[in-house]
Amino acid sequence: AAAKRRGEDPGGAGEGGGWRSYGYSAQEPIAVHRLDLETSGVLLLAKDKNSASSLQGEFEQRKVQKTYLAVCAVMGDRLFKTMDEGDEEDDSGIDFNGPGAVQVVNAAIGDAEPGTGEDDGGRCIRAVTLDGKPASTEYQVLSMRAGDPSSGTGACGAALVLARPLTGRTHQVRLHLAHAGFPIVGDALYGVSVEEVTRAVEAAREKRSALRRAATPGGGDSEDGADHLTREEREAAARRRILTSSRATAQSNTTSFSTASDDASSADAGAGGLIDLGFDGRMALHAWNLKTTHPRSGAPLRLAVDMPRDMAALAASWGLDVEGVMLGAAAAAGAAA
Protein backbone atom coordinates (compact mmCIF):
# COMPACT_ATOMS: atom_id res chain seq x y z
CA ALA A 1 0.00 0.00 0.00
CA ALA A 2 1.00 3.62 -0.36
CA ALA A 3 0.23 6.73 1.66
CA LYS A 4 -0.99 8.83 -1.25
CA ARG A 5 -0.20 12.51 -1.08
CA ARG A 6 -2.89 14.96 -2.09
CA GLY A 7 -2.65 16.43 -5.58
CA GLU A 8 -0.71 13.45 -6.91
CA ASP A 9 -1.57 10.61 -9.26
CA PRO A 10 1.12 8.04 -8.37
CA GLY A 11 0.34 5.91 -11.41
CA GLY A 12 0.65 8.84 -13.77
CA ALA A 13 3.52 10.94 -15.00
CA GLY A 14 2.45 14.15 -13.29
CA GLU A 15 4.19 16.31 -10.76
CA GLY A 16 4.38 13.50 -8.20
CA GLY A 17 7.00 11.65 -10.23
CA GLY A 18 4.93 8.46 -10.52
CA TRP A 19 5.63 5.42 -8.37
CA ARG A 20 9.33 6.23 -8.09
CA SER A 21 8.54 8.99 -5.62
CA TYR A 22 6.85 6.33 -3.44
CA GLY A 23 9.90 4.07 -3.37
CA TYR A 24 8.93 1.73 -6.22
CA SER A 25 11.87 1.71 -8.61
CA ALA A 26 11.66 -1.77 -10.13
CA GLN A 27 8.33 -3.43 -10.87
CA GLU A 28 5.48 -0.93 -10.65
CA PRO A 29 2.55 -1.95 -8.44
CA ILE A 30 -1.06 -2.10 -9.57
CA ALA A 31 -3.54 0.24 -7.88
CA VAL A 32 -6.73 -1.75 -7.22
CA HIS A 33 -8.90 1.28 -6.49
CA ARG A 34 -8.58 5.04 -6.81
CA LEU A 35 -8.66 8.16 -4.70
CA ASP A 36 -9.65 11.59 -6.00
CA LEU A 37 -6.67 13.73 -6.93
CA GLU A 38 -7.04 16.03 -3.90
CA THR A 39 -7.66 13.18 -1.43
CA SER A 40 -4.75 11.92 0.66
CA GLY A 41 -4.43 8.60 2.45
CA VAL A 42 -4.31 4.83 2.06
CA LEU A 43 -4.09 3.55 -1.51
CA LEU A 44 -4.21 -0.25 -1.81
CA LEU A 45 -1.72 -1.78 -4.26
CA ALA A 46 -1.06 -5.25 -5.67
CA LYS A 47 2.28 -6.74 -6.72
CA ASP A 48 0.86 -8.81 -9.58
CA LYS A 49 -2.24 -9.24 -11.73
CA ASN A 50 -3.59 -12.21 -9.78
CA SER A 51 -3.46 -10.32 -6.50
CA ALA A 52 -4.96 -7.26 -8.16
CA SER A 53 -7.86 -9.31 -9.52
CA SER A 54 -8.53 -10.83 -6.09
CA LEU A 55 -8.48 -7.46 -4.34
CA GLN A 56 -10.64 -5.82 -6.99
CA GLY A 57 -13.16 -8.60 -6.44
CA GLU A 58 -13.26 -7.66 -2.75
CA PHE A 59 -14.17 -4.10 -3.72
CA GLU A 60 -16.83 -5.22 -6.19
CA GLN A 61 -18.43 -7.46 -3.56
CA ARG A 62 -18.29 -4.61 -1.01
CA LYS A 63 -16.15 -6.60 1.39
CA VAL A 64 -13.61 -3.81 1.82
CA GLN A 65 -14.26 -1.33 4.63
CA LYS A 66 -12.93 2.15 3.92
CA THR A 67 -12.91 4.88 6.54
CA TYR A 68 -12.33 8.55 5.77
CA LEU A 69 -11.72 11.60 7.93
CA ALA A 70 -12.98 14.98 6.78
CA VAL A 71 -12.75 18.49 8.16
CA CYS A 72 -16.13 19.99 7.37
CA ALA A 73 -18.23 23.08 7.68
CA VAL A 74 -21.48 22.76 9.64
CA MET A 75 -24.45 24.17 7.79
CA GLY A 76 -27.92 25.21 8.93
CA ASP A 77 -29.61 23.32 11.74
CA ARG A 78 -27.03 20.51 11.67
CA LEU A 79 -25.27 22.34 14.52
CA PHE A 80 -28.13 21.91 16.96
CA LYS A 81 -29.15 18.45 15.75
CA THR A 82 -25.62 17.22 16.40
CA MET A 83 -25.64 18.82 19.85
CA ASP A 84 -28.61 16.62 20.73
CA GLU A 85 -26.64 13.49 19.80
CA GLY A 86 -23.89 13.96 22.40
CA ASP A 87 -23.52 14.97 25.99
CA GLU A 88 -20.24 16.91 26.02
CA GLU A 89 -20.37 20.65 25.63
CA ASP A 90 -18.57 23.67 27.03
CA ASP A 91 -20.06 26.34 29.27
CA SER A 92 -21.52 28.11 26.25
CA GLY A 93 -23.52 25.00 25.37
CA ILE A 94 -22.51 24.98 21.72
CA ASP A 95 -19.27 23.02 21.45
CA PHE A 96 -19.13 19.27 21.21
CA ASN A 97 -16.50 16.56 21.49
CA GLY A 98 -18.56 13.44 20.82
CA PRO A 99 -18.45 11.11 19.21
CA GLY A 100 -22.01 11.61 18.11
CA ALA A 101 -24.41 8.94 16.96
CA VAL A 102 -23.65 7.08 13.74
CA GLN A 103 -25.91 8.40 11.00
CA VAL A 104 -26.58 7.01 7.52
CA VAL A 105 -27.13 8.95 4.32
CA ASN A 106 -29.22 6.99 1.81
CA ALA A 107 -29.31 9.16 -1.30
CA ALA A 108 -29.08 8.06 -4.93
CA ILE A 109 -26.24 9.63 -6.92
CA GLY A 110 -26.34 10.52 -10.60
CA ASP A 111 -24.95 13.04 -13.04
CA ALA A 112 -25.62 16.70 -12.40
CA GLU A 113 -27.42 18.81 -14.97
CA PRO A 114 -25.60 19.02 -18.34
CA GLY A 115 -23.17 21.91 -18.47
CA THR A 116 -22.60 21.95 -14.71
CA GLY A 117 -18.92 21.18 -15.19
CA GLU A 118 -16.31 18.47 -14.66
CA ASP A 119 -14.06 17.37 -11.83
CA ASP A 120 -10.27 17.26 -11.90
CA GLY A 121 -10.39 13.90 -13.69
CA GLY A 122 -12.69 15.07 -16.46
CA ARG A 123 -15.72 13.26 -15.05
CA CYS A 124 -19.15 14.81 -14.82
CA ILE A 125 -20.03 16.44 -11.51
CA ARG A 126 -22.38 14.27 -9.47
CA ALA A 127 -25.59 15.17 -7.68
CA VAL A 128 -28.23 13.59 -5.47
CA THR A 129 -30.94 12.62 -7.95
CA LEU A 130 -34.14 10.60 -7.89
CA ASP A 131 -33.05 8.47 -10.84
CA GLY A 132 -29.44 7.95 -9.76
CA LYS A 133 -27.74 4.80 -8.54
CA PRO A 134 -28.41 3.77 -4.91
CA ALA A 135 -25.73 4.98 -2.52
CA SER A 136 -25.27 4.80 1.25
CA THR A 137 -22.69 6.35 3.58
CA GLU A 138 -22.30 6.05 7.35
CA TYR A 139 -20.94 9.10 9.10
CA GLN A 140 -20.21 10.20 12.64
CA VAL A 141 -19.34 13.64 14.01
CA LEU A 142 -16.25 13.22 16.21
CA SER A 143 -15.80 16.84 17.29
CA MET A 144 -17.53 20.12 16.52
CA ARG A 145 -16.98 23.82 17.19
CA ALA A 146 -19.78 26.33 16.76
CA GLY A 147 -19.49 29.35 14.50
CA ASP A 148 -21.55 32.50 14.17
CA PRO A 149 -24.37 32.05 11.61
CA SER A 150 -24.56 35.83 11.23
CA SER A 151 -20.99 36.00 9.89
CA GLY A 152 -22.43 35.97 6.37
CA THR A 153 -20.55 32.86 5.22
CA GLY A 154 -23.38 30.33 5.45
CA ALA A 155 -21.25 28.17 7.75
CA CYS A 156 -22.46 27.67 11.34
CA GLY A 157 -19.33 25.95 12.58
CA ALA A 158 -16.62 23.36 11.93
CA ALA A 159 -16.59 19.61 12.48
CA LEU A 160 -14.28 16.62 12.27
CA VAL A 161 -16.33 13.86 10.64
CA LEU A 162 -15.66 10.15 10.13
CA ALA A 163 -17.28 8.63 7.03
CA ARG A 164 -17.63 5.06 5.76
CA PRO A 165 -19.02 4.60 2.24
CA LEU A 166 -21.16 1.47 2.03
CA THR A 167 -21.33 1.70 -1.76
CA GLY A 168 -18.75 2.91 -4.26
CA ARG A 169 -20.15 5.80 -6.28
CA THR A 170 -17.97 8.55 -7.70
CA HIS A 171 -17.54 11.46 -5.24
CA GLN A 172 -19.83 9.61 -2.81
CA VAL A 173 -18.30 10.73 0.50
CA ARG A 174 -17.94 14.32 -0.68
CA LEU A 175 -21.50 14.53 -1.99
CA HIS A 176 -23.18 12.67 0.86
CA LEU A 177 -21.50 14.74 3.57
CA ALA A 178 -22.57 17.92 1.79
CA HIS A 179 -26.10 16.48 1.48
CA ALA A 180 -26.10 15.80 5.25
CA GLY A 181 -25.13 19.40 6.04
CA PHE A 182 -21.38 18.84 6.47
CA PRO A 183 -19.68 20.02 3.25
CA ILE A 184 -15.95 19.31 3.18
CA VAL A 185 -13.65 22.29 3.61
CA GLY A 186 -11.75 23.10 0.44
CA ASP A 187 -13.92 20.93 -1.83
CA ALA A 188 -14.29 23.10 -4.92
CA LEU A 189 -17.28 21.11 -6.22
CA TYR A 190 -19.45 20.44 -3.18
CA GLY A 191 -17.84 22.19 -0.21
CA VAL A 192 -16.89 25.55 1.28
CA SER A 193 -13.64 27.46 1.63
CA VAL A 194 -11.29 27.53 4.61
CA GLU A 195 -11.82 31.27 4.89
CA GLU A 196 -15.61 30.94 5.24
CA VAL A 197 -15.35 28.55 8.17
CA THR A 198 -12.57 30.55 9.82
CA ARG A 199 -14.66 33.72 9.74
CA ALA A 200 -17.66 31.92 11.27
CA VAL A 201 -15.65 30.26 14.05
CA GLU A 202 -13.74 33.42 14.92
CA ALA A 203 -16.90 35.54 14.94
CA ALA A 204 -18.45 33.17 17.48
CA ARG A 205 -15.32 33.21 19.62
CA GLU A 206 -15.17 36.99 19.59
CA LYS A 207 -18.80 37.22 20.71
CA ARG A 208 -18.23 34.82 23.58
CA SER A 209 -15.04 36.61 24.59
CA ALA A 210 -16.89 39.93 24.64
CA LEU A 211 -19.62 38.46 26.85
CA ARG A 212 -17.07 37.06 29.28
CA ARG A 213 -15.15 40.32 29.46
CA ALA A 214 -18.38 42.18 30.13
CA ALA A 215 -19.19 39.76 32.94
CA THR A 216 -15.72 40.12 34.51
CA PRO A 217 -15.34 42.93 37.09
CA GLY A 218 -12.90 45.49 35.72
CA GLY A 219 -12.81 43.61 32.43
CA GLY A 220 -12.48 46.76 30.38
CA ASP A 221 -10.20 48.77 32.67
CA SER A 222 -6.79 47.45 31.65
CA GLU A 223 -4.63 49.98 29.85
CA ASP A 224 -3.38 47.56 27.25
CA GLY A 225 -6.10 44.91 27.53
CA ALA A 226 -3.48 42.13 27.57
CA ASP A 227 -4.48 40.95 31.04
CA HIS A 228 -7.98 40.16 29.83
CA LEU A 229 -7.19 37.99 26.83
CA THR A 230 -9.19 34.80 27.15
CA ARG A 231 -8.16 31.39 25.91
CA GLU A 232 -10.55 31.85 23.00
CA GLU A 233 -8.90 35.11 22.00
CA ARG A 234 -5.49 33.46 22.11
CA GLU A 235 -6.80 30.58 19.99
CA ALA A 236 -8.25 33.06 17.48
CA ALA A 237 -4.88 34.78 17.24
CA ALA A 238 -3.23 31.39 16.78
CA ARG A 239 -5.60 30.58 13.91
CA ARG A 240 -4.78 33.84 12.19
CA ARG A 241 -1.07 33.05 12.44
CA ILE A 242 -1.61 29.55 11.10
CA LEU A 243 -3.79 30.57 8.17
CA THR A 244 -1.56 33.44 7.13
CA SER A 245 1.65 31.43 7.38
CA SER A 246 3.59 29.86 4.52
CA ARG A 247 1.65 27.57 2.17
CA ALA A 248 4.18 24.75 2.15
CA THR A 249 2.76 21.23 1.83
CA ALA A 250 3.33 19.10 4.93
CA GLN A 251 3.51 15.33 5.46
CA SER A 252 1.92 13.06 8.09
CA ASN A 253 3.53 13.25 11.52
CA THR A 254 3.18 12.33 15.17
CA THR A 255 2.95 15.85 16.59
CA SER A 256 0.38 16.41 19.35
CA PHE A 257 -2.38 18.77 18.25
CA SER A 258 -4.48 18.71 21.43
CA THR A 259 -3.86 22.35 22.30
CA ALA A 260 -3.55 24.31 19.10
CA SER A 261 -3.28 27.67 20.80
CA ASP A 262 -0.35 26.56 22.95
CA ASP A 263 1.50 25.08 19.97
CA ALA A 264 0.84 28.10 17.82
CA SER A 265 1.87 30.58 20.48
CA SER A 266 5.26 28.88 20.67
CA ALA A 267 5.58 28.75 16.90
CA ASP A 268 6.90 32.29 16.75
CA ALA A 269 10.13 31.03 18.32
CA GLY A 270 11.20 29.00 15.31
CA ALA A 271 10.59 26.15 12.92
CA GLY A 272 8.54 23.13 13.90
CA GLY A 273 5.56 25.04 15.30
CA LEU A 274 2.16 25.34 13.69
CA ILE A 275 3.13 28.58 12.02
CA ASP A 276 4.96 26.42 9.49
CA LEU A 277 1.82 24.39 8.76
CA GLY A 278 0.01 26.77 6.43
CA PHE A 279 -3.04 25.07 4.94
CA ASP A 280 -3.21 25.76 1.22
CA GLY A 281 -6.98 25.56 0.84
CA ARG A 282 -7.03 22.03 -0.59
CA MET A 283 -9.85 19.57 0.04
CA ALA A 284 -9.63 18.34 3.65
CA LEU A 285 -10.52 14.69 2.95
CA HIS A 286 -8.26 11.83 4.01
CA ALA A 287 -8.55 8.06 3.43
CA TRP A 288 -7.71 7.12 7.01
CA ASN A 289 -7.84 3.33 7.05
CA LEU A 290 -8.87 0.34 5.00
CA LYS A 291 -9.76 -3.22 6.02
CA THR A 292 -9.74 -6.22 3.70
CA THR A 293 -8.18 -9.70 3.47
CA HIS A 294 -4.76 -10.61 2.11
CA PRO A 295 -5.16 -11.94 -1.46
CA ARG A 296 -2.90 -14.96 -0.83
CA SER A 297 -3.08 -15.86 2.85
CA GLY A 298 -6.64 -14.74 3.48
CA ALA A 299 -5.51 -13.11 6.74
CA PRO A 300 -7.22 -9.89 7.87
CA LEU A 301 -5.42 -6.86 6.50
CA ARG A 302 -5.71 -3.37 7.98
CA LEU A 303 -3.90 -0.39 6.48
CA ALA A 304 -3.87 3.02 8.10
CA VAL A 305 -2.13 6.38 7.85
CA ASP A 306 -2.43 9.60 9.83
CA MET A 307 -3.96 12.76 8.46
CA PRO A 308 -1.44 15.10 6.82
CA ARG A 309 0.10 17.48 9.31
CA ASP A 310 -1.49 20.59 7.79
CA MET A 311 -4.98 19.05 7.83
CA ALA A 312 -4.66 18.03 11.50
CA ALA A 313 -3.31 21.47 12.38
CA LEU A 314 -6.20 23.18 10.60
CA ALA A 315 -8.75 21.11 12.54
CA ALA A 316 -6.98 21.77 15.84
CA SER A 317 -6.76 25.49 15.11
CA TRP A 318 -10.57 25.59 14.99
CA GLY A 319 -10.74 23.85 18.36
CA LEU A 320 -11.55 20.38 16.99
CA ASP A 321 -10.21 17.40 18.93
CA VAL A 322 -7.92 15.35 16.66
CA GLU A 323 -6.00 13.42 19.33
CA GLY A 324 -8.29 10.41 19.11
CA VAL A 325 -7.59 9.84 15.42
CA MET A 326 -3.83 10.38 15.37
CA LEU A 327 -2.20 6.95 15.21
CA GLY A 328 1.44 7.95 15.47
CA ALA A 329 4.25 6.72 13.26
CA ALA A 330 4.74 3.37 15.03
CA ALA A 331 1.06 2.42 15.00
CA ALA A 332 0.62 3.48 11.38
CA ALA A 333 3.69 1.53 10.31
CA GLY A 334 2.46 -1.55 12.16
CA ALA A 335 -0.99 -1.30 10.61
CA ALA A 336 0.48 -0.96 7.14
CA ALA A 337 2.99 -3.79 7.49
Image (cartoon, rainbow, N blue to C red):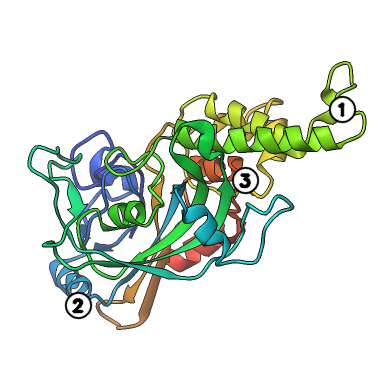
- Give coordinates of residue 132: x percent, y percent: 13, 61
Of badges 1 and 2, the one in the foreground is 1
The front one of 272 and 259 is: 259
Farthest residue to the top: give it. 223
Say which element carries label 3: loop
On screen, residue 239 versus residue 74, left or right, reads right
At x 87% / y 27%, what residue is drawn?
A: 227
- Contact, mark 1 vs mark 2 (Cβ under 8 Å): no
CA–CA distance in space, label 1 to label 3: 22 Å
Q: Answer whether residue 326 is visible to the viewer in this image.
A: no
**Which residue in the structure is indicated by mark 1?**
227
Label 2 packing within 10 angstroms: few (<14), some (14-19), many (20+): few
Q: Which mark is residue 114?
A: none
Q: Position of residue 113 (x, y in %)?
A: 11, 45
Q: Amino acid at mark 2?
A: Gln
Which mark is drawn over residue 61?
2
Q: Residues within 10 Å of mark 3 (few under 14, many from 20)?
A: many
Q: Which mark is residue 319?
A: 3
- Image quadrant in which you'd find residue 244: top right
Where the N terminus falls, by quadrant?
bottom left
Q: Residue at x 54, y 56 (%)?
A: 80
